[in-house]
Image (spheres, rainbow, N blue to C red):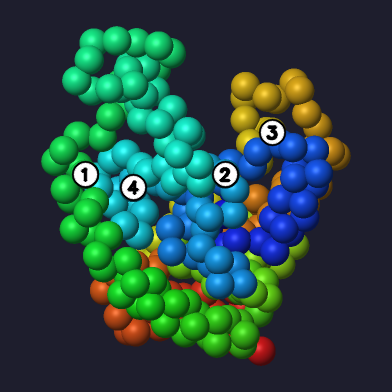
Amino acid sequence: MHIGGVIAPSVREILKLCAARDIPVVEDAAHALGSQLDGQRAGSLGVLAAFSYYPTKIVTSGEGGLIAAKHERHAIDARARRDQGKPSFERNYHDRIGNNWRMSELHAAVGLVHQRSLGRFIAERREQAAFYDLSLRSIRGISALGEPRGSVGNYYKYIALLEPGQDRDALKARLREKHRVSLAGEVYQMPCCAQPYFRDAFTEAEFPAAYDFCRRHVCLPLFSGMSREQQQRVVNALAEELGGVT
């Protein structure tokens, strides 16, 4: 998964390992529409990729998503499975298990129009992110996550890391109550392995980095049309609540 719209360079290692074992790679590109790694677009790294057009995403159709396929046979299979397992919309003939996963025509029309502005949306978000990057350098207790070398993200989320020992929930409450600044929801409030369904299957000691990231990261407000004045308000509130500037 390209979390927060960032394609980690380590995906190259995954691709190499899987290629050696003839294992197909499916990208979870829900966050990463328009993101790149070394000039290669998200969704073109594996044999299949899934994108989300959920209302919170940079481009939205209101609901639904998109599947990108490198091979025609996978595209044919995906089209059939979204429509009750029918290879043809015109025949009531089912040759595989499927479901009603069709996007409505209305949602598709909205998504197609919104898609035209993707480049402009990403450029605006990257400009906003650059302001946060510069501003956070002088605030104690927090740092920008940043982008790995070669990765150009869409900034679906602007992710920053709190220093160890910071109480994220308390900080968010102070920002909201004292400054009327609401931080966006975390990309993962807890690791997937800590969800109730898996709670007895894994231990925290098995995934220390995931637990540390989930506990310490915050997502600063970032959206189309956000003004520099609004961003400065966020920065000032963080500086006050985290103990000022360096």
Residue at point 62%, 24% (across, down): 196
Q: Toward which corner of the image does residue 101 lie, by quadrant?
A: top left
Residue at point 30%, 48% (across, down): 55
User: Sequence order check: which comes first, mark 4 or mark 2?
Assistant: 2
**Circle 4 is placed at which residue position?**
53
Q: Nearer the viewer, residue 19 or 84?
A: 19
Residue at point 80%, 38% (across, down): 21
User: Sequence order check: which comes first, mark 1 or mark 4?
Assistant: 4
Secondary structure beneath dot 3 equals: helix
User: Sequence order check: which comes first, mark 1 or mark 2?
Assistant: 2
- Image-based side of 159 in relation to 232, left or right: right
Q: Nearer the viewer, residue 189 or 113?
A: 113
User: In this rendering, which labeled residue sits more in front, label 3 or label 1?
Assistant: 1
Query: How far apart, in angstroms, are the residues tagged by discs 4 and 2?
Result: 20 Å
User: In this rendering, which labeled residue sits more in front, label 1 or label 2?
Assistant: 2
Q: Nearer the viewer, residue 102 or 20?
A: 20
User: Sequence order check: which comes first, mark 3 or mark 4?
Assistant: 4
Mark 2 residue crowding within 10 angstroms, few (<14) / some (14–19) / many (20+): some
Query: How far apart, in angstroms, are the residues tagged by discs 3 and 1?
Result: 34 Å
**Circle 3 is placed at which residue position?**
193
Q: Toward which corner of the image does residue 198 lie, by quadrant?
A: top right
Residue 238 x %, y %: 52, 74
User: In this rendering, which labeled residue sits more in front, label 3 or label 2?
Assistant: 2
Q: Nearer the viewer, residue 122 or 21?
A: 21
What amino acid type should be assigned to the residue bearing mark 4?
Tyr
- The image's mark for residue 47 is 2
The answer to whether marks 3 and 2 mark residues whose Cβ atoms lie closer than 8 Å is: no
State whether residue 125 is above or below residue 206. Answer: below
What amino acid type should be assigned to the residue bearing mark 2?
Val
Residue at point 61%, 72% (across, down): 38
Residue 199 x %, y %: 70, 25
